[in-house]
Amino acid sequence: MSEKAAVIEAPGGPEQLKLVDVDVGAPGPGEIRIRHEACGLNYIDVYHRNGTYPLPLPARLGMEGAGVVEAVGEGVTHLKAGDRAAYASNPPGAYSTARVMPAKAVLKLPDGIAFETAAAMMLKGLTVQYLLRKTLPQGGLQAGDHVLFHAAAGGVGLIACQWAKALGLQLIGTAGSDEKCALALENGASHAINYRRDKDFAAKVREITGGRGVKVVYDSVGADTWEGSLNSLAPFGLLASFGGASGPVPPVNIGTLAAKGSLYVTRPTLFTHIATLESAQAMGDELFAVVGSGQVKIRIDKRYALGDVTQAHRDLEARLLTGSAVLLP
């Protein structure tokens, strides 16, 4: 049966994305076939499209989706045909009406969470889970501790603001406008810094923390914030660099970490954390619980038809989106 999928034949701009007919077929051992009700839109998709993270070509894009399982392959026991399900997973291919994919990172979706919500939250929400719950400074994080989170009004950031508040953390968010700062504060950030106006955000962080700095910085911006992020840390602090929206981090002189207070640096990725079903399920259970309880609300600011994926990528790269956005097959 012919389905639709967004494909690139060469890396480049949003115009490289084409919607084509594809043959989906039946799931093999360890696989499922899922019919999408909604597909997530994430900045990693831009990196795949423009070649920053190269894919074998021609390539399908999209790392996140939600829908109904149509068939399961041999050996798959945690899902069955008819189940509501959601995922953030390799390989890419979520920008499609239906697909066959590995089952190990596809989770059964609780009835209380809508498909659109699930498609908007799996990659971003699981990212926040591994950051706030697993990527921790020496001694961990306790209620009352300050953390710095860049891009606090984005899809990941707004989830982080709410989840940090639920954990009792004092989240200092940065964003590029007063409106985005207000959004971060509305979603639970304790403080917000407009880095376009306060270019030395590290000085503001020191001011907020009484000169101490923060235990951990969560940084998805990369090149533009790297130096300021290091300067925001307390001694023994951790810089978790989990993206490079402004470009890759420059080569690091490891001696700098000594000079700035025995700092730690890590470059985690979601896909290491969800490499096994057991780990993905445990992380997903925690995400489903915090969303199901209402402590974290998933904000969907934009919905695009799958056929409008080119425009969706233009908007994503132009930083026109706050919260999350989804593609609807």
Image (tube, rainbow, N blue to C red):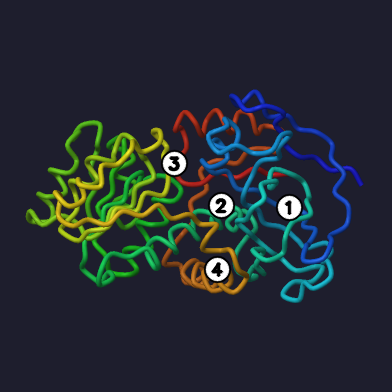
Q: Amino acid at mark 4?
A: Gly
Mark 1, residue position: 36
Mark 4, residue position: 284
Mark 3, residue position: 322
Q: Mark 1: which secondary structure?
A: strand
Please tell me which of labels 1 and 2 falls first in the chain: 1
Please tell me which of labels 4 and 3 falls first in the chain: 4
Determine contact: label 1, label 3, CB under 8 Å: no
Q: Residue at x 25, y 72 (%)?
A: 139
Q: Amino acid at mark 2?
A: Ala
**Could you say which quadrant of the image residue 60 lies in?**
top right
Q: Amino acid at mark 3?
A: Thr
Please tell me which of labels 4 and 1 falls first in the chain: 1
Q: Residue at x 41, y 39 (%)?
A: 244
- Mark closer to the observer (4, 1): 4
Q: Position of residue 307 (x, y in %)?
A: 72, 33
